[in-house]
Image (tube, helix red, strand yellow):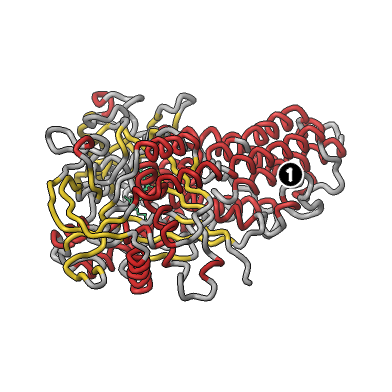
Amino acid sequence: MPEKRYYITTPIYYVNGVPHVGSATTTLLCDAHTRYRKLRGDNAYFLTGTDEHAQKVADAAVKVGKIPQAFVDEVSQRFVECWQYLGIEYDSFIRTSEERHKKVVREVFSRLQASGDVYLGVYEGWYSVADETFFRDTDVDENGIVKETGAKVERIQEEVHYFKLSAYGERLKAHIDAHPTFLLPETRRNEVLAMIEDGLRDIAISRKNAGWGIAVPGDPEKVFYVWFDALINYLSDTGWPESPDWNTRWPADAHLMAKEIYARFHATFWPAMLLGLGLPLPKHVVGHGWWTVGGEKGSKSKGNIPEPKAVVEALVAASGASESAAKDALRYYLLRDIRFTDDSEFSLELLANRWNADLGNDFGNVLNRILKATYFDGVVPVNAPLDAGLAALAAETVAGYTKALERFDWGSALASVWPLLRAVNVYLAQKAPWKAAKAGETEAVAEAVYNALEGVRLATYLLSPVMPGVAAEVAQQLGVASLTDGTWEESTRFGTLPGGIRTGEPAPLFPRVDTKILTLTETPMETTPAPSVATETPAETSNEITIDDFLKVELRIADIVAAEKVEGADKLLKLQLKIGEEDRQIVSGIATAYTPEELVGRQIVVVYNLKPRKMRGVESKGMLLAATDAEGNAILLQPDKKADSGSTVR
Ligand code: MSP
């Protein structure tokens, strides 16, 4: 019998949606967890995909004048591209319009029908197309709005097939009681138990056929209700029931999702269907909170939450870091701050804080400081004694990290690495190898350098599922081929960094994000597929550039002819420039340092050939050059004496 794989799934994404940082979070949690299980030696398998049969998908297709199948073919690709952009490595991407899925849906229906779990009835009540959910009178307010989600409902009356969910309450409760970690976190488990206690209601699993969906066998006037269809994806991907190895991927080890689709769908309806089929239940169903913006659920239709690419681009522009580092920093922020019990507020400021404090200060700087000093000519000391305090803390860190991940709690797992990183910083400050080196205390320097590097190595190993690009960069700087090739046992033991290796070129991993210029370029809601994604630039090994690289940047003298504040943005000023004969507008984050009045008449240096972008909806064509003071306020660069407007700066 082939080995059972560690099977992890995301919910499958409504194909008419846009992958934003909220939906990316669930996918990233699964990616990190799969990478983690692989580090532990498991044969892990990660499934994601797109949910394509919703009524709202058909409506969206009509709006753009496409037939639904052509529409979903195009937009499913948007998710594939976004996940690729974020370095997400799944094993399978399932689409519910694929034949391999449709035939399993029909099979599940036929089996449930044969076992008496399905009956024909009439549904009369509320339906929300936005939520693709049937609602009770008590769920809806007097204006026809769903209290929980704010979506509009319509009254429907039609013949449907029902699944006898009400018959499964007792068995579900028994399973939940016998498997304390089946439903995670505990608060959600309690909600589900309360729901079962209240009594589960039978659920409609078919709807009238409006030309889009999987037709019900023997009743082509109807298609399956989108949730019945969609949940089955987890099983169809395994190849059940025909494939000889379907049970190497079933039961799933973990289904991960956010809270709105937890209790009603993944923790009751889906397990009851599996019980009806006589199949084992997933080991863990894990629900996380939402990213909110101003307290409201972040959603692309509200336009309040950005797409990952826009955030990465803003981070690169505000820090000068590589795209790969910015992607990893976004991955880190999303998994560090998403919570399992409560919601979390998404903001660029909080992200910049995580970057500057956790990643820049505590993590990146320590490595850079040691490597730049080139103790021992850049060779890792051999046979240095291990520091007992750091070794003990490292063991504690690994234990805390592992424990948190038994419950899929990535926020706590990541947080558990920071005491180790901070201890390495304190250790270095105390041991002061730079002083010991001056005093010629070679052994003391060797001990300090080795232990600090080893602390960073072990921390990076634990961070690698979340920041794989950064882990590769740290490996290069440490002079090893990879930090993740060894076994889990070896790699989590303090003291495995080989001595005698020559370290690589040091380069700052996370140059400081300038919060004054950290702004999103507005990306209008797309109705057509996103263009194919740019391939990732190779990780830089050093931040040196050639003269040719420098000459690509066109710097010119400009005169400021007018300036005003950008409405709704405390830090931004809109400047009208004269560059030679040309009129130009730029937006700049200098409002905390200069009033509009004191700018008019000045000459400045601008990056002339910068790609135009929008900041707070205002077009900016170019960027001015400025230094910053200790508080982060801008100090404008200007020519020493009057220069010709439009002249080139070299
Ligand atoms: N298609 C259904 C799932 C079917 S699974 C059999 C669906 N799709 S969705 O695209 O609307 O949402 C997919 C997932 O995106 C949600 O479960 C959730 O995990 C995630 N998120 C969407 N918005 C989110 C936030 N604002 N915050 C965190 N996660 C959120 O539901």
Q: Amino acid at mark 1?
A: Glu
Asked if residue 18 can be seen in this view, the reply is: yes
Q: Nearer the viewer, residue 650 or 62?
A: 62
- Where residue 316 sits in the image (x, y, percent)? 43, 46
State how many labels appear: 1
Q: Nearer the viewer, residue 346 or 547?
A: 346
Residues 13 and 645: in front is: 13
Give the residue displayed 24% in from the left and 65% down from the top.
Answer: 213
**Relative to 499, is 650 on the left or the right?**
left
Residue 332 x %, y %: 51, 43
Quadrant the N terminus occupies: bottom right
357 left or right of 192? right
Q: Residues within 10 Å of mark 1 (few under 14, many from 20)?
A: many
Which x, y percent locates residue 457? 69, 46
Is 465 or 501 nearer to us in this picture?
Answer: 465
Q: Position of residue 445 (x, y in %)?
A: 81, 37
The correct choice, above or below, for 260 with respect to 209 in the image is: above
Q: Is residue 351 left or right of residue 442?
A: left
Residue lying furthest front in this view? 116
Say which element carries label 1. Answer: helix
Q: Which residue corresponds to the image point at 15% horizontal and 48% vertical from the top-left?
A: 124
What's the residue at 68%, 38% (across, down)?
A: 397
* Residue 487 found in image quarter: bottom right
Which residue bears the numbered disc 1?
A: 454
Question: Which residue is at a point 65% across and 36% down the rendered structure image?
Answer: 421
Q: Is residue 312 visible?
A: no
